[in-house]
Image: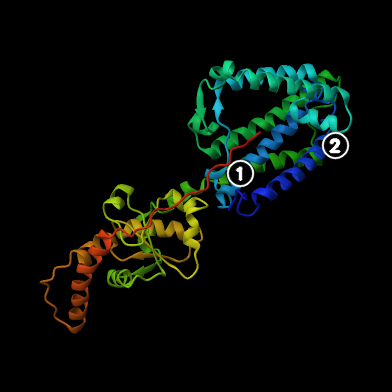
Amino acid sequence: MGPLVPDVVGNELNFIVALIIGIFFGVILEQAGFSTSKKLVGLFYGYDFTVLRVFFTAGIVAMIGVIALEHFGLLDINLTYINPTFLWSALIGGLIMGLGFVVGGFCPGTSICAAAIGKIDAMIFIAGSFIGVLIFAEGYPLFEGLYKAENWGNIRVFDSLGMQQTVFAFFLTAIALFAFWMISIIENKVNGIKKPAFRFTPYYVTLGAIGFILSLSAFVLTERKDSLQNLVSDKEFVNNYDLKTMSVDEFAYRIIKGDNKLQIIDFRPLEEYKKQSLPGSTAFTFDNLFEKEPSKILRIRHKTNVFVANNEYEERQFAIIANRLGFSNATILTGGLESFDKEILGFDKNSVATTKQESDTYRFRTKASSIIPVLIKENKSAGPVKKTQKRVVGGC
């Protein structure tokens, strides 16, 4: 599950990978003509909208890609850096950058690309950029109030608009397709081209079909959490789902023996968990199942993961979600902790057995009801699942 740094790509190798990606990015920019200021500023004068097409396409592809990776469990969005939004500094900074773009003919990225192939105007633009950075850095105490004004945090647009991620992705893709059509009309008019903006040729039909498929794909790639929550809201489905189970007696026996192959995953609210937690148990939440680092403990081989909650129905819901996420060794405690409390911890020692099997069972439960409360008091639980990885600070 991504992000790949630092698990797959180490922090040192990360710089080398970034350098290689940067080189290829620069080559692509140069081949697309982004090292030419005339092509770049064409956006502002209406004769060439290549910049808008490229960056709008990049944004749509990246958006659909992130949604798809998250949907298939290949990306932990909680570890993906999202630039914090400071409203006023974003507006003023965008205005300054746009003005610099139209006057200087470059943006920071394209200026480096153009300078790399010997463009003198790009080198002057870069020098001006460094002067601007120096002024901002040295005058930061004066700008700090404005810079940090209206801090909206790490927000996402669809959250701000109060709509589902898939709906927003569909509308944004549709807006991009409409924008491509409109700017083609504007380009033709400014450049004096009489041909229609779009013609029913294989090229345009293919582009339109790809755009249409992309816009619809957003609805197919629903948020994984939402789809799984809807799945386990069906009581009949949950109750009939085939799951591995463990009886309260076996569970108690393995706790007393200190079985190191037993992993107790406790899904109760944290307040309840803190009041009374079983030896070696780990507090888990619904969100932890989707997170890269916490879910690692569920993948440890040769371990029996026993999901516990107040009742068996809740355990079944979490275990079904775990199974759908690929955790095949999830086991539920028969009857839930309510049954465990009643039949083991609060066992009635005056119960009268009528069969040999019941006699053995009652004898064990009498012993367990004395030992396990002592183990609970010793507080040997693992506590809430550990999360040491954080979002890496960065961004463009």
Q: Amino acid at mark 2?
A: Gln
Q: Residues within 10 Å of mark 2 (few under 14, many from 20)?
A: few
At 69% from the left edge and 21% from the top edge, which residue is drawn? Answer: 134
Mark 2: which secondary structure? Answer: helix
Disc 1 or 2, which lies upstream in sequence?
2
Indicate the position of residue 58 as horizontal and vertical percent values: 70, 37
Q: CA distance from mark 1 to mark 2?
A: 26 Å
- Badge 1 crowding class, 10 Å Cα cut-off, few under 14, some 14 to 19, many 20 or more, is some
Image-based side of 196 in relation to 222, left or right = right
Pick the residue in front: 12 or 116.
Answer: 12
Left or right for 228, reference 8: left
Q: Position of residue 183 (x, y in %)?
A: 75, 25
The reply to whether residue 45 is visible in this rendering is no
The disc placed on residue 31 is: 2
**178 and 100: which one is in front?**
100
Q: Which picture quadrant has residue 208?
A: top right
Image: 260 above or below 285: below
**Residue 66, numbered circle:** 1
Q: Nearer the viewer, residue 80 or 202?
A: 80
The answer to whether residue 302 is above or below residue 173 is: below
In this image, 108 relative to 149: left or right? right
| Residue positioned most to the bottom | 356
- Residue drawn at 55 percent across, 42 percent down: 391
Position of residue 132 relative to residue 299, above or below, is above
Front in this rendered view, residue 124 or 211: 124
Q: Quadrant of the C terminus?
A: top right
Q: Amino acid at mark 1?
A: Val
Q: How is the image coloured?
A: rainbow
